[in-house]
Image (cartoon, rainbow, N blue to C red):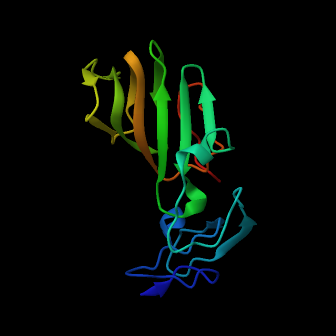
Amino acid sequence: MKRCCKSHQQFHPGDGVCLGFNCPGFHGEKHDRRGPSAQIDETVVRFHDVKEKQDVIVRELKDVIGSWRHASGDGWESRRIVLADDRMGCSLHDTLVREGAELHLEYKNHLEVNYCIEGEGEVVDVATGTIWPIRPGTMYALDKHDRHILRATKGDLRLVCTFSPALSGRETHDSDGSYKLAD
């Protein structure tokens, strides 16, 4: 086992390449992932509200709503509960898609899993035209950076979503519906 970088003192099996955001010692620094003797890039990327990792992270939705973690756009809201600065390796969102909204999305840099807890809708795989109904208890995973259309057809669609790698919370959708990777 080798240390991933001087700053973290984290040990990883095998070649010792740091896992970046997934590294339990992640402190917001960019990593050089080229090999076992990885050196820290001196550029430090600090996220808002970076704190030392606590034993347990507890956050209530009421505290996220209206804060910098609450993002919205035309027909949607994303309440970003767990983000990259929490160092969990993924982010967790409580997302609302307003009834009648149709979102054209493609997460080129992230994998996404969604679990419906309210409302009804559908997700369309743009490549194949396949349409899957979404209702409470339905999960869908975009495991190939799939271009897709998400529609809320009966009531507001409420989804519990995860992204990997984790979002910082400051992302906005590009014109193609994707998010850029954090530097």
Place of residue 36 in the rendered image (x, y in percent of width and height, measured from the top left): 50, 80
* Whether residue 37 can be seen here: yes
Residue at far top of view: 100
Q: Quadrant of residue 33?
A: bottom right
Q: Nearer the viewer, residue 164 or 157?
A: 157
Q: Quadrant of the N terminus?
A: bottom left
Q: Nearer the viewer, residue 122 or 116?
A: 116
Q: Nearer the viewer, residue 75 or 165?
A: 75
Q: Residue at x 48, y 15 (%)?
A: 101
Place of residue 41 in the rendered image (x, y in percent of width and height, measured from the top left): 69, 70
Q: Quadrant of the C terminus?
A: bottom right
* Whether residue 108 can be seen here: no
Task: Determine whether 29 is above or below 122 in the image.
Answer: below
The tally of labels here is 0
Q: Quadrant of residue 78?
A: top right
Q: Residue at x 66, y 44 (%)?
A: 170
Q: Residue at x 54, y 64 (%)?
A: 87
Task: Determine whether 170 is above or below 101 in the image.
Answer: below
Residue at far right of view: 43
Place of residue 127 in the rendered image (x, y in percent of width and height, measured from the top left): 32, 23
Residue 122 in the figure: left or right of residue 58: left
Place of residue 130 in the rendered image (x, y in percent of width and height, measured from the top left): 25, 20
Task: Determine whether 56 is above or below 122 in the image.
Answer: below
Q: Residue at x 33, y 42 (%)?
A: 143
